[in-house]
Image: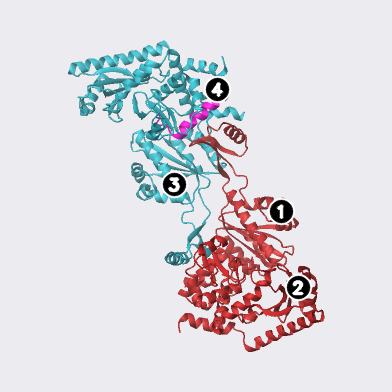
Chain colours: A red, B cyan
Amino acid sequence: MGAHEAICSEVLKAITPGPEEREHVVSLAEALMDRLRALLEDEGIEGDVRLEGSLAKDTWLSGEADVDIFVRFKPEVPREFFRKDFLRIARKAAEGLRQVERYAEHPYLECWSDGVRINIVPCYDVRPGEWLSATDRTPYHTEFVKSRLTEELKGDVRLLKKFMKGIGAYGAELRTGGFSGYLCELLVIYYGGFLKALKGALRWRRGTLIDIAGHYEGREDEAREFFRHHLIVVDPVDPYRNVAAPVRLDKMCLFMAAAREFMLRPSRTFFFPPEPRPLGPRELVELLSSRGTSIIAIHTRTGGMVPDVLWGQVYRTLRALRGTLAREGFEVLRTSAWSDERENCVLLLEFASSILPPVVRRIGPPVWVEEHVERFLSKNMTDPGLVCGPYVEGDRWVVLIRRRWPDAKEFLVKKLSERGGRDIGVASLLARQIEEGFEVLRDGEIAKLCSGLEGFSSFLRDFLVGRPAWLAGRSA
Amino acid sequence: MGAHEAICSEVLKAITPGPEEREHVVSLAEALMDRLRALLEDEGIEGDVRLEGSLAKDTWLSGEADVDIFVRFKPEVPREFFRKDFLRIARKAAEGLRQVERYAEHPYLECWSDGVRINIVPCYDVRPGEWLSATDRTPYHTEFVKSRLTEELKGDVRLLKKFMKGIGAYGAELRTGGFSGYLCELLVIYYGGFLKALKGALRWRRGTLIDIAGHYEGREDEAREFFRHHLIVVDPVDPYRNVAAPVRLDKMCLFMAAAREFMLRPSRTFFFPPEPRPLGPRELVELLSSRGTSIIAIHTRTGGMVPDVLWGQVYRTLRALRGTLAREGFEVLRTSAWSDERENCVLLLEFASSILPPVVRRIGPPVWVEEHVERFLSKNMTDPGLVCGPYVEGDRWVVLIRRRWPDAKEFLVKKLSERGGRDIGVASLLARQIEEGFEVLRDGEIAKLCSGLEGFSSFLRDFLVGRPAWLAGRSA
C-alpha cells in the first residue's frame, strides 16, 4: 500500500460514521418522516415523503450529518400550497425542535435536533425535463448516485468531500463558489475513485467537459458553446444543467493545484488543516506594519441579508471597487471579505500603497484637434493643481498636475458617504447598509475589529499569510 | 493692418540686417574669398569659390550672420585632397582668425572674425542626382531659393526663422531635431509667406507631404511609403531627400501648436522669448521639494564628443533608461538633458515617485503547467522576500514579494557602476564616459550642479516650468 492509500485509509476511518452515529441520525430522520406522513394523511393530502441527500446516498461525513427530507407532490398542487399549508404541516411535524424558515427558489423548513440539521423540502413529482421547481431534480440525483456507488466508492466520495472541505473548495453557495456534494459524487463516479479523480483533475483545462450520461456524445463543442464555463459537468438527469456552474475559476484551479500537490506530497493536512490561530492585537499591528503593503477594511452591517444575497453583493462590490480604484491609479493587489452572515461584514482591499505620488501626467489631445486643444489648455492652465506644462510630447499636449485623490482611504470615506458608494460601484443592497453606517480602517487600525467580531481575527490571519496550509510541507 | 501684420512688421525691422552690418559681413566674406582664390591659383588648383547659405540668399538674421564659403571641385579630385591640401589652404586663407577644424561627412574649416562665424567647405561640382558628397547639393539649394524669393518673401523667411528660434524649433542638429534654415525657406516658398506658412501648418497631420517641385505628383502615397516620416518636404533639387527628416514629431507639433497660438493671440514673445532667469540654490531646493514629483540627475563628462554624436548618445540613453526603469515599475513622467557641448552633460529623469512601494505582485504560471508551477513554488517559497502566498488567483499561482529595486536612485547608481550602465541601455560612448566618473543626484541635491555648470540653472528652470513662454499670455 502506497503513502497515498495509507493516508486515505486513515482519513476514511475518521470520517465514516460509526454504527451508533448512523443509528442516531437515521432514527431521528425516520421519526420525523413518520410524523410528516401521519399529518399529511390526517389532512388528506397526497405526498410522497422520502429521504434524500447524502444520508440517503450514504455519502455523509461523520459529525456533519444533514437530514434532507423531501415531500413529493403531484404537479397539480399549486405553488401557493408550498408557501402556506406545507410550511404549517412541516412546522407541526418538527414541533419541539429549533426551526428556521428558509427560502431558496421556494420555501422550506430548516430545523435542528441534537446538532443535526434537518431540512424539510417540498417538490413536484415530475418526469425529467419537465421540472416545475428547482428541487424536483433531487430525487433523480439520489437515484442516479445510489445506482452507481459501490460501498468502496461511497468511501471515495467521503474522501473527496473531506478533501474539498480541507482546502476550502467545498460548497456551491456563493460565498465559496466551490464543489457541491453532488458534484463530488459525480466526479468519483466518472473517474472511478478518489485518487483517480485527483489524477483526472490534473488534466483539466479551461473548458473541460465531463458528460457521464453522454448527453453530448459527438457534440462536445456544442456543449462548450452552450454552457460557456471553465468547468462543465453535465447533470446525468438534466442535459441542460451544468452541475459545476457554481465553481469559480479560482476554486477549480485551487482544487487542481491541491490535487497536484497531494499526488506529489500526500499528507493529512489536506483533509485536516490546522485551526487558524487567531492574532493578538499587538501581533496584528506588527504584522501589518512590517508587511510593506497597505490594507484597507470597510466594515458595515449585513442588514439580515441571506448569505447568497449578501455574498453576491459583497463580491460584486469588491470587483467594482477594484476597478474604480484602479482608474484612480491605485494598484489593488488582493481583495477579500469576511462576514458572520448575521450582522457584520468586512471588505478588505490590499494595496501596493494606499497613498499615491501626488502628481500625475495628464495626456491631452493631439495639437491639431482644435476644440479639444482649446479646452485642454484653458482648463489646465487655470487649474490650481498645475505643476508643470502644458508642454508638447510626441504629438500631444501634456501637463503634470496634482492628483485629485492621492489617498485611497480618503477617497473611500468620501465616496461611501455619498449615496452609500453607489457611484463607485457598491451594490445597491450593500449601499443601503453603508448609508446606515460604516467605518473605513487602515493597517494597524484594523486591529480594533478583531476584538469585536468573532472569527474575524482567524480570517485575517489566513488573509495575511495567504498561503494554503497544505503548501507548508514545502517550506521545510 | 491687422495685429499679426503689425507685429511681423515690427519684428522684421529688428531682425533685418542694416546697410552697415551687411557691408561689414559681405566685405569680410569677399576678402576671404579673394584670398582663397589667390591661394588656389598659386597652387594651380582648379576650384570655384562661391558664397552660399543664408548670406548668399539674403535670408540671414541681423546679429547672427553665418558666412558659408564653398569651394567647388571637379569630380576627379580625390576625397583625400579635402582632408589634407584643402584644409591647409583654407587655414592659410584664414590666417589670423580663430580656427576650428570640423568634421561633418567630410572635413571643413570653421573660423571666427568679429563674432561672425565663417565656414570654408569643399564640395564637388556634379549634376543633381550624381552627388559625391553631402555638401554638393548646397549650391543647387542656393540657386533654387534665390530663383524663388522676392524681396518680400526674404523678410518672410527671416520671420519664420526667428519664430522657430523663439519657440526652440530652429536647427536640424540632433540636439534640437527641428527646422533647418533651408526648410524654413522652402515652407515660405511653398505657402507664399510667413503667416500663410503658419496657417498651412495648422492643417499638418502625421504624414504631411510637401512636394514643391512635384517630383511625386500623382504618386503621393508612394512618397509617403518611401520616406515614412511624420513630415515630408521633398527637396526640389533631390527627389530622394526629405528636407524635414531631422524634424522630430514633438518639434513638428510644437511648431504647429505655436502657429495656432500665434494666429489666436499674436505677440512678440514668440520671436523674443524672455531670457530664462537662472534659479538661486534656495529657490531651486524649494521648487523641487514642493513639486511633488522626484527628479534624478545623472552628471557625467562628454569626453569631447562632437555635438551630434553626443546628443545621439544622450537621447538613445534616455529612451533606454525610460524603458528599463518602466520595467522595474517606475513611472518616468519626463526626461531631458543638458550639455555645454564641451565638457559636461546632465541627464534628467522626472518620476511620479523615485521610490516605489516595497511589495509587488508576481504572477506565476497557470496551475496546470507542471514544470513552471514546480519552479515557481520552490523558487518563491524559499525567497526571503516572500510577503504573502503563494495563492491561486484565477487560474494562476501568485505571490506578493519584496521589490528588488524600490529606489530608482540606488538602482541607477548600482547599474551605472557596472560597465558604465551598458546593461541598462546606456549608449556605448556615453557608457565609456560614465566608467570614468559620474554622479547621481536627487531633488534638492541637484542644486549643487547649478553653481558648477554655467547655463544649467536656466535650463533647469525651463525644465521645471515646462511651459513655453508664448503660452504665458493665457494665464493672465
Which of the two marks, 3 or 2, is nearer to us in this view?
A: 2
- Residue found at x 41% / y 39%: B315
Q: Do the dots labelled 3 and 1 sit on one chain?
A: no
Front residue of A201 and B341: A201
Quadrant into which the N terminus of chain B falls = top right
Residue A420 is tagged as: 1
Residue density around tag 1, few if under 14, some if 14–19, many if 20 or more, within 10 Å: many
Q: Helix, strand or loop at disc 2?
A: strand
Residue B267 bears which disc, if any? 4
Residue B169: quarter of image: top left
Residue where numbered disc 3 is placed: B323
Which of discs 4 and 1 lies nearer the camera? The answer is 1
Query: Dot 2, how many residues are within 10 Å of its Cα: few (below 14), some (14-19), or many (20+)?
Result: few
Cβ atoms at labels 4 and 1 below 8 Å apart: no
**Tag 3 and tag 2, C-beta contact below 8 Å:** no
Looking at the rendered structure, the secondary structure element under dot 4 is: loop
Q: Badge 2 is on which residue?
A: A100
Left or right of B78? Residue A52 is right
* Prevailing SS of the magenta stretch: helix
**Residue range highlighted in magenta:** B244-264
Q: Are marks 4 and 2 on the same chain?
A: no
Chain letter of the residue beneath label 3 in the structure image: B
